Image (tube, coloured by chain):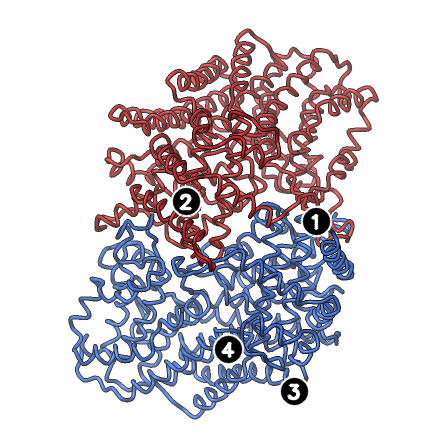
Chain colours: A red, B blue
């Protein structure tokens, strides 16, 4: 149950109505764990609406605070989980073919010639250092590695007998291909055109030959290179022969849209990475006074790898990755002493502490986002303290960055500044949502504009490739729907302006973000559809019958994603309904559409008029939420 | 530091000498975590011996209790970790070839004809039900699955174009091949001979053709089938498309020696299994009063899968698998209420609760074994309570088993009885080690004899295939070295007799346990070598110089395995000594031999005479501990 009436009733009991009725302990999640275990998540989610109806009929400005709290759950389920972490995994419908995958990998490996490979590595070193320097040892060693790669290739071609390669060889390939992959991901089309022949790629993809490189074509190249990198890891048998290059390869790929386009594979990989990190004691990086120099360097490197892994782990966590490790690093705000050894010994260290800075910012993000999809709300003082910590980090970064002016530091500066402003945005959104602090809306819009300005600045300064960083998509895909949601209920010039700015920005998003761009546009379009529905449909009456179709639809959306993520499998195919009736079977698309048949829903449904149902179903057919996950 | 003098000094401080000196918190592990983090594990381990020297020169019966406590660490490092969970993972030396693996898989798939496949499935169903019924749904569904398998094969052969298979198809293959694998693992040679042609297997393996099946040949068949099963999982892309059949396939394979022959692959697999189990809410199995029948059945099945996974997870845990999940189920002895819902609703349920019983026994094993490699010792009352709980479980099982007389229940009875007696053995070993309880030695020997008798009974009753269960190897490989160790310092007729019995038993072990048999024999042989060294070498003098070479060797053994499991990788190849000097690099065999160069060791080494060093090095060359892990 959402904490619906913040201002009116000071003394609210937080338990959901089901838990209250059953006298069970409620953990305040939406839906709460107890309800989920009992298969009553629909009723738990519905109970929110029931409490809401009494407010209808009042002016929208009065119930807006309540609506905004609904947003916190909607943001969690639709933007975080639905958009980025939900995928149809019906094994019955997934065609797999290892031989075809091997052939594909061979094609991409043959496409890349020696000259192009050195240019790609150069590009990764010169332009994208910020994305991977932290996880690597001696960079100069990569060029001999690439020479070895070509020597192996030559030997294999010249030799008449079969050449045996070691797991080490394939790990080396994987690391090099990870570099090639980020280079083709970030490289501008005109540079890419000099390295690869578009026609042979078109031929392979069986599309009409193009004379020049398009973003769509370079996206296919990037996907092919990603698959080739993963194949090298598979060939190295990474589950049998652990190696730190698994972590490095993963970290490098993680700076591309691979991180959300194949989220289940990424979840599996990060869990393996954590296993290997612990096997190699990567998480034992705390410095001791009696460490010798080699140990110090090594620990410094391990700390960075661990921070990078924990950031990735935090960003991936959700219902499909319930095993997580980032919580092993405490909150910067709750336990600053944990970070002291680092800030004292490391902050002005010659060697960049970019990764630690990123982790600090992300950990503050974590401190705020943990209230998403929770009935409990952060105390005002907590928000203030997080804001202060963030300001400290911001100052540290600006001190450090004044001294540096390399292309690496430019990218580092962009990423950290972008992250910091996004967390500031979240803090002010939280002030608005939970405490209706005056000016919060304007301040949040200010930070949105700052974020947009940073992206525009990249373009004007010739760094538009930075805008392909997955953080850009992650953050804008939270912010844009918020204002679209807000404007369903309240429209001001300020809101309309920022919506227009965001839409314009999204229209310039790189196609390298893949299909997720379409999903984001679908969400925005759908929220706009709800805005129209909101103005067109007038609800008359009171009590349960007075629910507006818009709330019903928003609620159904959350239920849909929640349900989809509570899959319970058949124990073995063909045993019929061994799976709990109230839950979905894995990816059985047909059954997903039947969730209105739940008992809990029946009770509410009985009170809904035919007209109401028709409005809801017409909208849901027109804007089918299914599109978000297929 | 080991808790050396139990009886003499009542008030012992448990912290290790390094932690005492540095005034840091000591967690009492051997070596302790603080020392490991500082790279001082050698000194931490050595400190044990220093405290020991004052006792030398007295009669062996007097310092035997102290020696037995040393055994607890030795058992942990050499038997549990060294024998079962340590492997050379030097990627530079591991040749990998995916195409060869695919060809191998094709060979085994072609070797198996339709008739043989049905017979293997029959064997798994009729003889080995106890090993997999708990994790499956409807058994009758497996035969149609096998028919589908052959239909797919036929289609692929007849069709001129490429047939596309789904991930679901490969999962189905994986499950079927897991059954084929356990069947060839357990099947007697004469039955195997009727299903497979030994000559074509010999030809494939490029060995001289044999007219009949040998255990060695059937081991190769088993290995090939295991690889084929894993390949089906890979082809299903299990890291991308999660499915419960990953768990089932893993659980079935886990009843073979696969579980310790490829321990790192198994570690990786179990972590993926846990991820999938949580994704599908397998761990939400607690029954509620308002569950409908389908939900109840489903939860019952999930509980069993979760217990089986947690058993596997517990048995695999160690320095190379630091991520574990079994601790999510509390101890039966410390929190019996957790299990109440199960014992009340389930114990006399028609559906067998074999998996819960196994978990209960294993959880009591966990309660005792957690004191292995710890300075802290269990309170006498704790041991008594564990013994009582175990007796209760024993009673539950015997009540249940009186009613049943199927081949499935015979195997279930053997496994549970064997496990129970092994835990009783551990309890009495603990009484002996920590409290020198009179008769404990005899009682432990009694339980050893009971275990041997159970194995002999299997042979006489025509169930000798049961003796191939990996638990048999796990348990005997802990017990046999204990008496071999004991007899270094004290020999009685009773000890000599049980040693002879155990050696005879091990000589009859199935070759299906693989190379680990040789490793176990090596450990036993080596301990016997130490016995000879003990009687031959007289140590004169006192203080540090009086250390007997035998202790030095035992200590070095533990250091070796400990060190080998504290690998720290080069961050990137070729960066030289970025890894802490005090630790091993991944599988760089050369550096492993240099661990005597540690500073901590130097101090002790300076006090060792040349003669002493020569005795130690002669023995270590003759019985090179390296053999345990290569």
Classify mark 1: residues with Cα within 10 Å, few (<14), some (14-19) or many (20+).
few
Dot 3 or dot 1: first in sequence order is: 1
* Mark 4 Cα shell of 10 Å, populated few (<14), some (14-19), many (≥20): some
Could you tell me residue A152's position as x and y percent? 40, 51
Across and down, in percent, residue B583 comes to 29, 58
Q: Nearer the viewer, residue B389 or B229?
A: B229
Residue at point 36% right, 42% down? A135
Mark closer to the observer (4, 2): 2
Between discs 4 and 3, the one toward the N terminus: 3
Decide: is B459 above or below B9. below
Query: Can residue A374 be seen at all in this image of the molecule?
Result: no
Which residue was labeled with disc 1? B163
- Helix, strand or loop status at disc 2: helix
Question: What residue did someone put label 2 on?
Answer: A175
Q: How many marks?
A: 4
Crowd class of label 3 (few under 14; some 14 to 19; many from 20; radius 10 Å): few
Check disc 4 and report its element: helix, strand or loop: helix
Q: Which residue is mark 4?
A: B476
Q: In this image, A604 relative to B526: left or right?
A: right
Chain at tag 1: B
Q: Please tell me if label 3 and label 2 are on a single chain.
A: no
Measured in 3D between alpha carbons, the distance from the residue under mark 3 to the one under mark 1, in whole angstroms, is: 50 Å
Q: CA distance from mark 1 to mark 4?
A: 49 Å
- Residue at disc 3, secondary structure: helix
Do marks 1 and 4 share a subunit?
Answer: yes
Do the residues bearing badges 4 and 3 touch, measured as CB atoms within 8 Å?
no
């Amino acid at each position: 149950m959402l904490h619906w009436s913040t201002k009116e009733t000071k003394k609210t009991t937080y338990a959901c109505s089901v838990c209250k009725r059953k006298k069970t302990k409620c953990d305040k999640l939406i839906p709460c764990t107890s309800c989920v275990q009992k298969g009553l998540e629909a009723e738990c989610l519905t109970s929110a609406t029931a409490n809401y109806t009494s407010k209808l009929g009042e002016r929208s400005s009065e119930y807006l605070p309540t609506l905004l709290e609904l947003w916190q759950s909607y943001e969690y389920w639709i933007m975080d989980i639905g958009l980025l972490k939900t995928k149809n995994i019906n094994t019955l419908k997934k065609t797999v073919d290892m031989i075809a995958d091997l052939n594909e990998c061979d094609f991409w490996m043959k496409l890349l010639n020696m000259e192009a490979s050195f240019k790609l590595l150069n590009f990764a070193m010169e332009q994208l250092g910020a994305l991977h320097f932290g996880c690597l040892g001696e960079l100069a060693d990569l060029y001999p590695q690439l020479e070895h790669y070509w020597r192996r290739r030559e030997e294999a071609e010249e030799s008449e007998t079969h050449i045996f390669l070691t797991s080490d060889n394939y790990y080396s390939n994987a690391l090099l291909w990870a570099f090639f992959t980020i280079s083709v991901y970030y490289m501008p089309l005109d540079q890419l055109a000099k390295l690869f022949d578009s026609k042979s790629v078109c031929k392979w993809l069986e599309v009409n030959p193009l004379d020049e490189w398009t973003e769509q074509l370079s996206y296919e190249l990037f996907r092919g290179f990603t698959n080739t990198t993963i194949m090298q890891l598979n060939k190295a048998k990474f589950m049998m022969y652990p190696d730190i290059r698994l972590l490095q390869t993963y970290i490098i790929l993680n700076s591309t849209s691979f991180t959300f386009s194949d989220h289940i594979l990424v979840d599996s990989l990060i869990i393996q990475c954590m296993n290997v990190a612990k096997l190699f004691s990567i998480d034992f990086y705390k410095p001791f006074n009696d460490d010798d120099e080699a140990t110090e360097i090594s620990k410094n490197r391990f700390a960075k790898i661990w921070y990078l892994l924990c950031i990735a782990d935090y960003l991936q966590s959700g219902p499909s990755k319930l095993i997580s490790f980032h919580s092993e690093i405490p909150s910067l705000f709750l336990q600053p002493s944990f970070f002291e050894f680092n800030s004292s010994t490391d902050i002005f260290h010659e060697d960049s502490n970019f990764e630690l800075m990123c982790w600090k910012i992300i950990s503050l993000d974590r401190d705020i986002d943990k209230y998403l999809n929770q009935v409990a709300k952060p105390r005002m003082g907590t928000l203030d303290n997080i804001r202060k910590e963030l300001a400290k980090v911001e100052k540290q970064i600006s001190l450090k960055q004044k001294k540096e002016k390399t292309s690496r530091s430019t990218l580092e500066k962009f990423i950290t500044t972008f992250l910091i402003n996004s967390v500031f945005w979240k803090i002010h959104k939280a002030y608005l949502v939970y405490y209706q602090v005056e000016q919060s809306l304007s301040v949040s819009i200010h930070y949105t504009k700052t974020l947009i300005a940073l992206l525009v600045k990249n373009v004007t300064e010739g760094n538009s490739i930075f805008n392909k960083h997955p953080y850009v998509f992650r953050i804008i895909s939270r912010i844009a729907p918020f204002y679209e949601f807000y404007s369903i209920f309240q429209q001001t010039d300020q809101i309309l302006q920022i919506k227009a700015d965001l839409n314009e920005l999204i229209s310039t998003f790189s196609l390298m973000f893949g299909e997720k761009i379409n999903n984001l546009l679908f969400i925005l379009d759908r929220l706009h559809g709800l805005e129209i529905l909101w103005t067109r449909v007038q609800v008359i009456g009171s009590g349960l019958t007075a629910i507006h179709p818009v709330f019903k639809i928003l609620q159904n959306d959350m239920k849909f994603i929640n349900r989809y993520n509570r899959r319970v499998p058949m124990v073995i195919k063909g045993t019929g309904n061994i799976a709990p009736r109230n839950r979905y079977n894995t990816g059985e698309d047909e059954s997903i559409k039947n969730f209105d048949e739940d008992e809990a829903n029946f009770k509410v449904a009985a009170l809904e008029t035919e007209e109401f149902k028709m409005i809801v179903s017409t909208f849901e057919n027109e804007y089918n939420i299914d599109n978000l996950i297929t």
